[in-house]
Image (tube, rainbow, N blue to C red):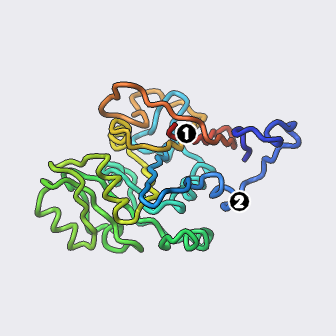
Amino acid sequence: MRRLFPVTDQTSASPQERDDREWSLDELADAYAYPALKADGHWLRANMVSTLDGGAQHDGRSQPISGESDMRIFGTLRALADVVVVGAETVRQEGYRPARAREAFAARRAASGQGPAPAIAVVTAGMDLDFSLPLFTSPLVPTLVVTGAAAPADRVAEAARAGAEVVVAGDGEGVDPARVVRELAARGLRRQLTEGGPRLLGQFVAADALDELCLTISPMLVAGGAQRIAGGPSVTVPHRLAPACVLEEAGFLFTSYRRI
């Protein structure tokens, strides 16, 4: 892997002199470290993958357009987060399981005052989830179900019986994206990572709640009707972000853009 941005002496070196070795997990963690937060601060970053022609999925899943290095970064971003925020449809399609503790990041997490693994927070309006899955019944850290005050009461009760913590972040059935961020931060989950899907990411973008986008550009073309990385309501004025980091390996570009 090599760094393309920010430009360094190594970046401008000849191809023979560039550092194209596989980066260690510590190096990746340093490259993707969260910014320092104020006592009452929080930071929401998204991690998504897109093909060259803008597809976020193939056959309804993101895995076919990913790669080995992308999955290493995926794991690193999870290991740095307090909580992983994900939409219910993505949980169903991608077969989400509880986040696991990883020895490679144990010391870093302990030094940051974090638990052994990030919590998973599932955002849902209709509560159409299988609460018998390990994500709810046997996580290392209790899973959170984030929903609105008018969500079906029987399903809310079932989630609680399964061991999930129900978080109310909206006055109706659905959630207020900005309130999701605040409610999680109020529980000490301030370093936040969303893995989508596109509908949830679009809601965060429309609410101007997203602080950072970590976007993998996959060297693939899928055509067809594949979703973009973000969908849903449009913004009145496009949100502009500033590039923070660009890495490259095997034709994949790993980019990070932060709020200006």
Seen at 25% across and 58% down, the residue is 129
- From the viewer's perspective, is residue 210 above or below residue 78? above
**Count of all numbered marks drawn on residues in the image:** 2
Residue 191 percent location from the top left of the image: 46, 58
Label 1, label 2: how far apart the Cα atoms are: 22 Å
Check disc 2 and report its element: helix, strand or loop: loop
Q: Quadrant of residue 121?
A: bottom left
Quadrant in which residue 156 is drawn: bottom left
**Label 2 sits on what residue type?**
Ser
Of tags 1 and 2, which is closer to the observer?
1
| For marks 1 and 2 on the same chain, the one whose residue lies earlier in the sequence | 2
Residue 200, percent across and down?
34, 44
x and y, in percent, of residue 1 in the image: 72, 47
Q: Identify whether 223 is placed above or below 48.
A: above
| Image coordinates for residue 5, horizontal then vertical, percent | 69, 38
Crowding at dot 2, Cα within 10 Å, few <14 / some 14-19 / many 20+, comes out as few
Q: Residue at x 11, y 61 (%)?
A: 153
Look at mark 1 in the image and give the residue it sits on: 257
Q: Please tell me which residue lies in front, 64 or 192.
A: 192
Q: As displayed, is residue 236 above or below residue 253? A: above
At a point 24% along the width and 54% down the height, the residue shown is 169
Check residue 24 in the rendering and tell me which mark sits there, or answer none: 2
Left or right: 13 with respect to 181?
right
User: Is disc 1 in contact with disc 2, using a CB cutoff of under 8 Å?
Assistant: no
Secondary structure under tag 1 reads: strand
The residue lying furthest to the front in this view is 39
Q: Nearer the viewer, residue 255 or 53?
A: 255
Using residue 198 as the reference point, say whether residue 112 is left or right of it: right
- What's the amino acid at mark 1? Tyr
- The residue sitting at 51% across, 27% down in the picture is 53
Identify the image quadrant of residue 205: top left
